[in-house]
């Protein structure tokens, strides 16, 4: 049996079903390349009293552990909710094709936690990702998604790739938007779902030099409903 288990957003957020799957497992793997964990991943072993084998992107995409699941109980732990990344959906596809029994244990992710900002989930448009900029590679596709969402009066959630600190991410955002998108007040969410959760709602200038911890994301709000505005004003932190 192959178990795809969501860890949720904090160290103790794994579900009872997920814990039970780990206790039945012959091997437990951890996918640890798609997000900057808000805690030391080695603590997972202490909390769950289990041995965890970290997997790189290459090892996950090789899918060797699925072959093991033909004869053993194999768990793959994923931060947040396990089916928000296409890689993991591909694992389910392969399991079906090869007749491997599987279970998925869902959990909370940024897509639910963002509601803590007060913004209504159904008012979000397409989700954007911000890749890391290199010397000769400065992708700005997330800017086009912001423009599209603004045209339909939808909020934009921008997920920031692993390995980008807040200072650089803010710089990428401002440079990509340039004069084509007017950035007034934006929302920054840091470590949502944990005890260190922070939500900032302010102008760009106030964010320069701010200390924002990973994982974090940006939200470019569209027109705010009065209830969204009231909650956002109530939950926002001072920089």
Image (cartoon, helix red, strand yellow):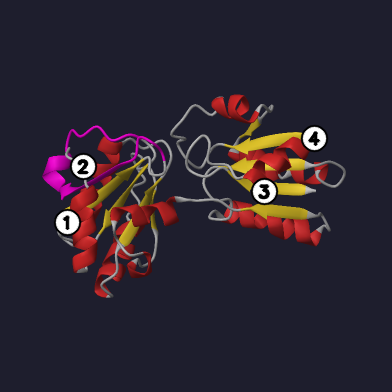
**Quadrant of res 126:** bottom left
Question: How many residues crowd around disc 1 within 10 Å: few (fewer than 14), some, or many (20 or more)?
Answer: some
First-in-chain label (2 vs 1): 1
On residue 237, the disc is 2
Label 1's element?
A: loop
First-in-chain label (3 vs 2): 3
Question: How many residues crowd around disc 3 within 10 Å: few (fewer than 14), some, or many (20 or more)?
Answer: many
On residue 26, the disc is 4
- State left or right for residue 118 relative to residue 33: left
The spot of residue 67 in percent (x, y) is: 81, 45
First-in-chain label (1 vs 3): 3
Which of discs 1 and 4 lies nearer the camera? The answer is: 4
Which residue is identified by label 1?
Answer: 183
Residue 222 visible, this angle: no
Is there a contact, CB below 8 Å, between mark 2 and mark 4? no
| Span shown in magenta | 194-213
On residue 4, the disc is 3
- State left or right for residue 100 relative to residue 136: right
Q: How far separated are the C-alphas under marks 3 and 2?
A: 35 Å
Question: How many residues crowd around disc 2 within 10 Å: few (fewer than 14), some, or many (20 or more)?
Answer: few
Label 4's element?
A: loop
Q: How far separated are the C-alphas under marks 1 and 3?
A: 39 Å
Q: How far separated are the C-alphas under marks 2 and 1?
A: 19 Å
- State left or right for residue 237 relative to residue 93: left
The spot of residue 51 in percent (x, y) is: 69, 27
The vertical placement of 54 against 103, above or below, is above
Residue 108 drawn in magenta: no
Is there a contact, CB below 8 Å, between mark 2 and mark 1? no
Q: How far separated are the C-alphas under marks 2 and 4?
A: 44 Å
Is there a contact, CB below 8 Å, between mark 4 and mark 3? no
């Amino acid at each position: 049996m192959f178990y795809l288990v969501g860890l949720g957003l904090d160290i103790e957020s794994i579900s009872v079903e997920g814990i039970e799957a780990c206790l039945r497992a012959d091997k437990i793997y951890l996918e640890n390349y798609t997000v900057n964990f808000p805690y030391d991943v080695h603590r997972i072993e202490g909390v769950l009293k289990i041995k965890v084998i970290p997997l790189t992107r290459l090892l996950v995409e090789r899918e060797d552990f699925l072959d093991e699941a033909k004869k053993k109980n194999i768990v793959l732990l994923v931060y947040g909710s396990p089916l928000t990344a296409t890689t993991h959906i591909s694992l389910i596809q392969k399991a079906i094709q090869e007749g491997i029994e599987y279970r998925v244990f869902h959990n909370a992710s940024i897509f639910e936690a963002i509601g803590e900002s007060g913004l209504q989930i159904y008012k979000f448009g397409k989700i954007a990702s911000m890749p890391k900029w290199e010397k000769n590679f400065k992708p700005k596709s997330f800017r086009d998604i912001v423009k599209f969402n603004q045209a339909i009066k939808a909020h934009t959630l921008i997920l920031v790739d692993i390995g980008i600190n807040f200072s650089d991410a803010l710089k990428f955002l401002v440079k990509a938007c340039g004069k084509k998108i007017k950035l007034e007040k934006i929302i920054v969410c840091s470590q949502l779902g944990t005890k260190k959760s922070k939500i900032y709602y302010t102008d760009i200038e106030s964010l320069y030099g701010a200390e924002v911890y990973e994982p974090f994301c940006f939200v470019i709000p569209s027109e705010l409903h009065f209830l969204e505005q009231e909650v956002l004003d109530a939950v926002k932190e001072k920089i």
